[in-house]
Amino acid sequence: MDPSLLSGVIVVIPSLNPDEKLEVTVDALIASGFTDIFLVNDGSDAEHAANFPIRPECTLLVHTVNRGKGAALKTAFRAIADSRPDCRGVVTVDGDGQHRPEDAVHCAQEMLHTGGIVLGVRDFDRDNVPARSRFGNRMTSLVFRVFCGLRISDTQTGLRAIPARYLPVMLTVHGDRYEYETNALLQMKSAAIPFSEVQIQTIYLGENEASHFRPIRDSLRIYSLILLYLSSSLISTGTDLLLFFIFSRVLPSSWGAAAATVLARVLSSILNYLLNRKAVFRSKASVGRTFVRYVILAAVVMLVSAGAVSGISALLGLESEGDALLKTVIKAGVDCILFLVNFRIQREWVFADKETKRKETK
């Protein structure tokens, strides 16, 4: 193809202990029209470091120790931002042969056409997809849809085309290992960055044994935001119960259980707000604005929960004391739904940093 069509589009390939497939991948990309490729040696040992090809089209960046795929991508993005003022965008490619050069070209062309981020997505219904990859992607896609309102076919794809204007945003994404790519998708949502998907070939080599993905540890990293939110909720609930117990013992009996309930809920809610602001969503928005929104949301959720439970109980004709267990089950179901809704509203409204979003998308 005409090299000028891909002028200013830079390929980024992070790699740890690559084999001979990296050289094949690089040569195929060059043959497809890419003329600027950044390779990141993410702490490979001496034997495998020799597999990083030396080409006029290649720039080699080196981590002396393994820091993770996310850190390697950010190292390349930072170097490109500093040394390539004419960069139009980057295409991230895995160096193990699982991404075809024609797919990288297609993603680059789509990026230049739309001006948004392009995700190269695989078909996980194919017979050659390993069971762990199929399950992992479907689970993560479901979590993204339910918790974050993001419909993404392939949440774990490493083939992504990113316009140069969004590289500063990608440099702010939290995480240095596999969770970086998942967090980048969440950052795209927060910063209102447009994206599209391009179907690519689904290639797995030998049950994907070359992958450095660690199923348990890296899955925990990927789901860290949701796990933090769940942990914050559990800690706040436990605090609420403990404070209720303490206040019930120390407050005058004339005050009744209502006073202990209110005091415990107020203090545990303040704790939940602080945990969510600092540890979960890492919000940079003002305390005043976020706290007011948090209080409004908490009040609305409480009213909706009470109204929904009362309404469903009335429809089912649950009036007697003997129906208390069924009412509790109904409340648990309602609160589970509200828990998911609460997460999305807190992330996208309560703790969203609108000023940062405006700066990122300019």
Image (cartoon, grey):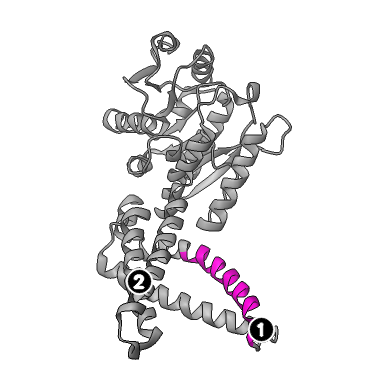
Q: Please identify the quadrant where the N terminus is shown.
A: top right
- Magenta span covers which residues? 321-342
Q: Amino acid at mark 1?
A: Gly
* Residue 70 x, y percent position in the rendering: 40, 34
Q: Which residue is mark 2?
A: 243
- Residue occupying the point 37% across, 66% down: 239
The answer, for residue 353, to whether it is visible in the render is: no
Q: Quick one: SS at disc 1?
A: helix
* Residue 96 x, y percent position in the rendering: 54, 21
In front: 302, or 80? 302
In front: 274, or 104? 274
- Residue occupying the point 34% across, 59% down: 275
Depicted 351 relative to depicted 99: above or below = below
Query: Number of labelled discs?
Result: 2
Depicted 204 relative to depicted 244: above or below = above
* Callout 2 crowding tier (Cα within 10 Å): few <14, some 14–19, many ≥20: some
Which of the 4 image quadrants contains residue 9? top left
Is 275 left, or right, of 226 in this rendering?
left
Q: Amino acid at mark 2?
A: Leu
